[in-house]
Image (cartoon, rainbow, N blue to C red):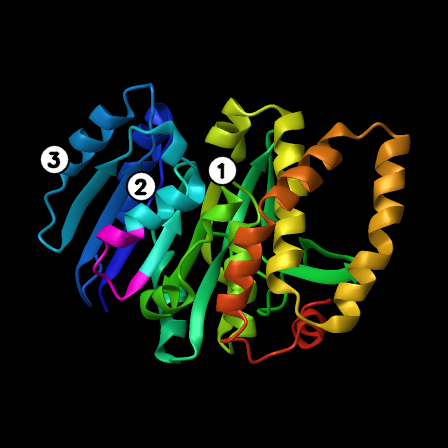
Amino acid sequence: MNISIIIPNYNGEKILKKNLPKVLDSVKDYKKGYVEIIIPDDPSTDKSGEVIQQFIASIKEKHVLGKTCSNRDKQEGGFSKNVNRGVALSTGDILILLNSDVAPHKDFLSPLLKHFTDPKVFGVGCMDESIEEGKVVLRGRGIASWQRGFLMHSAGKLDKTNTFWISCGSGAFRKSIWEKLGGLNELYNPFYWEDVDLSYRAVKTGYTIIFEPGSKVVHEHEEGAIKKHFSEYNKIKIVFRNQFTFIWINITDTQLLLSHIFWLPYHTIKALLRNDKAYFWGLWHAMLRLPEIMQYKNNMKKQFVLSDKEIIKSVQI
């Protein structure tokens, strides 16, 4: 089984220096195929490019190959586009996505790969040892519920293996199914909800996703590009836009869609009363994308085999 590890980067010079050697150390002893470490670089303004080239040149293992591609156009930036560029370079059977601020444990690989003996498995998520305000918080499994016209997701208990989504910052995916699904939807650029969308489409198309607590990574959120380069207000705007986008693309159940329409005036009035400019920015910019959203929905819904209610019910606890 050949593996392609994809590490999307944007201005991650310092964290790359810290984490790339740990990624390499985790695959040195892999004997069941070759390993690609692919680092697609968005238009970084630091010395990321030099760090990446130096890392690739330092790889001595015969079964490990380093690759990179560089995007210099800011208009073509964003997480989904950067990941998709990395996937386009890949030749492995399994894609492992790691954020630049993620460092895998040395033995993280085997627990992930064992699940891919089942051809219906699309993805497997890691246990995140998330560093938050100096403390380690364990994360990795997601749950979901339908509340007042929206699909809400949150962290779930870690004693089960079913999950609502797999993070594209610490997860493994079968490439053949990834390509069938069309990869990450670039409408979600620059970030957020793209991995929830991918997981949802996969499950709705009949595939399986799994949370694997035995595969552990350390995730230093404070060092990530989003935390460093985007204000809280700008992040909230994008969250609102992408939350609307997710609903309009993926939800096909008539009752849930009517619920969404019914509750929309309520949410809009509440946003107006609290002067929530981010909500209105998100709603407006999602509406501007309606033609693209509907085209994407029409293409994808032909592949759906499960209902929205079946999916939500399966990951409520």
Q: Regarding mark 2 in the picture, which secondary structure is present there? A: helix
Which residue occupies 17% across, 60% down? 34
Q: In this view, does 133 lie to the left or right of 49?
A: right
Please, is residue 121 above or below residue 143 in the view? below
Per the model, the C-alpha gap separating discs 3 and 2 is 16 Å
Residue 10 covered by magenta stretch = no
Question: Residue type at mark 2?
Answer: Lys
Where does label 2 land, which residue?
Answer: 22
Callout 2 environment at 10 Å: few (<14), some (14 to 19), or many (20+)?
A: some
Residue at mark 3: 57
Residue under the image location 89 percent in, 47 percent down: 266
Q: Is residue 240 above or below residue 225?
A: below
Q: Name the residue under label 1.
A: 190
**Which is more N-terminal, label 1 or label 2?**
2
- Tell me if I can see residue 287 in this picture: yes
Q: Which residue is drawn at 62% across and 32% down?
A: 235
Number of numbered discs visible in the structure rendering: 3
Q: Residue at x 38, y 64 (%)?
A: 178
In magenta, the rendered stretch is: 87-94
Percent x, y of residue 177: 38, 70
